[in-house]
Amino acid sequence: MDSFKFNSNFFFFFFFSKQITFYFQGGLKAYFYQSFVSLDVANIQMHKIYSSKEMIRIIGGVIDTSKANGFSITPAGAITTNNLLTWEMMKPTDPKC
């Protein structure tokens, strides 16, 4: 019988990973996952970046925060180790659209 091995990296990512989403004109959004100690720390750091209109370089692209209309931070809803930048068009039913 196989034994279960605890993966501490998986545990850390699952409990501390946040989805960072930036919203742009026309319903375009970009998101990525980043590990933070807490939601408050994530919000403070992303607010500083957004306020100073910095560029965020991520595997798969760059986010120009000076072009963003806003951002949101949520606990990661899925178990993922995706460090890539993902771009999507929001659906008209999305409340942020």
Image: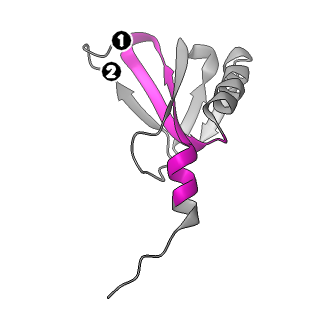
The quarter of the displayed image where residue 88 is located: top left
Whether residue 59 is visible here, answered yes or no, is no
Which quadrant is home to the N terminus? bottom left
The percent coordinates of residue 92 (x first, y second) are 26, 13
Residue named by callout 1: 97
Q: Is residue 35 above or below residue 9?
A: above
Q: Are marks 1 and 2 in contact (CB under 8 Å)?
A: yes
Residue named by callout 2: 90
The quarter of the displayed image where residue 67 is located: top right
Q: Residue at x 54, y 14 (%)?
A: 70
Earlier residue among tags 1 and 2: 2
Toward the bottom, the furthest residue is: 1
Neighbourhood count class around disc 1 (C-alpha, 10 Å): few under 14, some 14–19, many 20 upward: some
Q: Residue at x 71, y 28 (%)?
A: 45
Q: Is residue 20 magenta?
A: yes
Q: Is residue 51 above or below residue 85?
A: above
Instruction: State the extent of the magenta-drawn residues as a range.
Output: 11-37
The percent coordinates of residue 62 (x first, y second) are 58, 34
Q: How is the rendered protein coloured?
A: one colour
